[in-house]
Image (tube, helix red, strand yellow):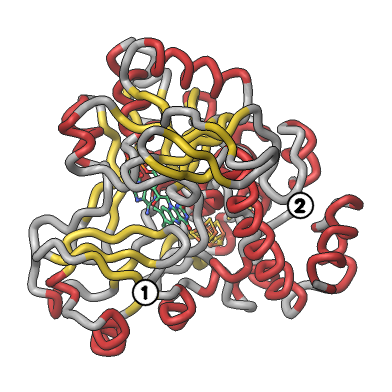
Amino acid sequence: MIRQVHEPGICGQCGGCVSFCFAGDLVAIEMGADGKPHYLDENNCLECGICFLICPQINILDEEIQSKYNWEPPIGSYKHIISATTTEQDIKNVCSDGGVVTSILVYLLEHKLIDGAIVSVSDGPFGRKPIIATTKEKIISAAGSRFIGRSNIEELGNFTTYSQTMFALREIKNLDMLKIAVVGTPCQVHTIRKMQYLGVMPAHVVKYVIGLFCLENFSFGPDKIQEVEETLGLGINEIKKINLKEDFIITTNSGEVRHIPLSELEKVARPACFACTDYANDFADISVGGIGSPEGYSTVVIRNELGQKVYSSALRNGYIKELETGKELDQGSSLMSTENGIFLSSKGRKDLIKKFAWFKRKRGIKTLENILSQEEVIDLMVEHEKKQIVEQYSQ
Ligand SMILES: Cc1cc2nc3c(=O)[nH]c(=O)nc-3n(C[C@H](O)[C@H](O)[C@H](O)COP(=O)(O)OP(=O)(O)OC[C@H]3O[C@@H](n4cnc5c(N)ncnc54)[C@H](O)[C@@H]3O)c2cc1C
Ligand code: SF4
Ligand code: SF4
Ligand code: SF4
């Protein structure tokens, strides 16, 4: 792990290795002041290899996980891709896109299908921290990306939109919870799926995984604030809400909406994200993003039987509703016409997600080419993908 993750600088500081180290009580490894794991006492290490196997930056279990979830590039296996929105005004007021993530969690909680959910609440400007939510109010408090409780930014230290969800999962070990849902980015979902595959506790209590699409997360220290503010064209304390779709979207305190090209924020994207190849959260039960749906709606990828069951029940019980289906402008068109306007058709939505997913896979593999051996990079690709990657590169 030191050679493949730390030395090349792609540790995402997720904390998974430290949280689930088998030498937990002996404390073999800990998170250092630099936010990265290091040995506290190498002699305490049991050499079990768990930290290595579950690290999201290590691809050693990819084949097993891919085959378990019938994965195919670029967006994994899925049953349906739909645009949907919440039916509850309290969620609509605060959510990122259509509030589908929050509504599904509330449905699961109110129907006693979960004891709680790991979600991430805003923690100051560009900050996010995981919590275990056991009430509807707490679940709703994590919706969207609003910046509440403004602080003196100079006192805040480092900014990161990345949430260390794995630390909350570790806390579950000490709680009497048997059924939980987790909302996470693709890297976090990879770790959970690997833990489940290996039987690492407490991954067995994770009954539902709702994944977010993710192109990248941002991280920067106080020294970069001025640069970021210049790029955004406003002070960090003037931001009310952020979102990521085709570009970076800011809503200011005065309600103005600004779109910033992602290329302009590359300088503060986390280095680990450039080595990441999963955009559409390919191993979740349900993946949710904003692209491809009209304002106020979430794009929902239902991936498996479990995801389908949960989504359909939430729909049937009135927690969410779908975007009306329209008439495709032409046969197989990317656009459809509805009474309320023209939107992307189901094909258009799928094609857009695939476009971003290919972009991210190519970017990730390119980064890994500089880190891993050629054989290791080729190992990352499946036959079908190698052909498509070559085709994409040649376009
Ligand atoms: C870092 C990040 C990058 C993203 N990139 C894209 C993208 O490129 N394209 C795209 O279409 N969509 C992206 N999304 C997803 C999008 O922003 C919405 O979260 C998604 O559409 C769900 O919207 P919603 O209204 O249904 O969710 P809501 O009902 O608002 O619920 C959002 C849920 O996300 C959780 N959450 C918020 N931030 C984090 C975080 N940092 N880590 C883990 N969980 C978190 C909250 O706990 C909450 O449960 C990204 C999200 C994040 C957090
Ligand atoms: S190999 Fe096992 S005991 Fe050693 S640091 Fe990793 S998880 Fe801990
Ligand atoms: S990415 Fe996460 S699991 Fe891997 S080394 Fe870094 S902190 Fe540990
Ligand atoms: S881009 Fe990848 S590594 Fe970065 S936060 Fe998203 S899923 Fe994790």
Cα separation, mark 1 vs mark 2, equals 36 Å
Image position, residue 266 (x, y; %):
47, 79
Q: Which residue is mark 2?
A: 60
Q: Nearer the viewer, residue 156 or 96?
A: 96
Q: Residues within 10 Å of mark 1 (few under 14, many from 20)?
A: some
- 1 and 2 marks in contact (CB < 8 Å): no
Q: Secondary structure at mark 2?
A: loop
Q: Nearer the viewer, residue 305 or 32?
A: 305
Q: Which residue is mark 1?
A: 260
Q: Earlier in the sequence, mark 1 or mark 2?
A: 2
Residue, x 77% and y 75% (percent of image)? 369
Image position, residue 354 (x, y; %):
65, 52
- Disc 1, ligand 1: is the CB inside 8 Å? no
* In front: label 1 or label 2: 1
On the question of residue 374 being in view, the answer is: yes
Image position, residue 295 (x, y; %):
34, 47
